[in-house]
């Protein structure tokens, strides 16, 4: 049997909120963010949240 990891609801909400916020703050005409410093912080937190959301736990050997 495969051990399926349940998706963390909290991380999913964080990823959705940060993704929409980044999309809204990006100006497609000038290809720049409205607030670049805040956008960098959003991108870092977005990437870390996605990493932990997708990351699979290592299989521990049973003794």
Image: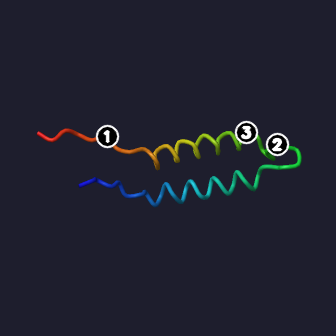
Q: Name the residue located 70 percent from the left edge and 51 percent from the top edge.
A: 22
Number of numbered labels in the structure image: 3
The colour mode here is rainbow
Dot label at residue 58: 1
Mark 1 and mark 2 lie on one chain; the one further toward the N terminus is: 2
| Residues under numbered marks 1 and 2 in contact, where contact means CB atoms less than 8 Å apart | no
Residue 46 left/right relative to 5: right
Residue at the disc numbered 3: 37
Q: CA distance from mark 1 to mark 3?
A: 35 Å
- In this rendered view, identify the residue nearer to me: 62 or 25: 62
Q: SS class of the residue under badge 3?
A: helix
The quadrant holding residue 6 is bottom left
On screen, residue 54 above or below 16:
above
Q: Name the residue located 88 percent from the left edge and 44 percent from the top edge.
A: 30
Q: Position of residue 12 (x, y in %)?
A: 51, 57
Q: Position of residue 10 (x, y in %)?
A: 47, 58
Q: Position of residue 56 (x, y in %)?
A: 38, 45
The quadrant holding residue 24 is bottom right
Q: CA distance from mark 2 to mark 3?
A: 12 Å
Q: Residues within 10 Å of mark 3 (few under 14, many from 20)?
A: few
For this orientation, the residue located farthest to the left is 63
Q: CA distance from mark 1 to mark 2?
A: 39 Å
Q: Residues within 10 Å of mark 2 (few under 14, many from 20)?
A: few
Q: SS class of the residue under badge 1?
A: loop
Residue at the disc numbered 2: 32
């Amino acid at each position: 049997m495969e051990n399926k990891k349940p998706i963390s609801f909290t991380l999913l909400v964080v990823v959705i909120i940060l993704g929409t916020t980044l999309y809204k703050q990006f100006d497609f005409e000038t290809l720049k963010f409205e607030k670049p410093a805040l956008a960098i912080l959003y991108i870092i937190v977005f990437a870390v949240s996605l990493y932990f959301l997708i990351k699979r736990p290592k299989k521990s050997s049973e003794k």
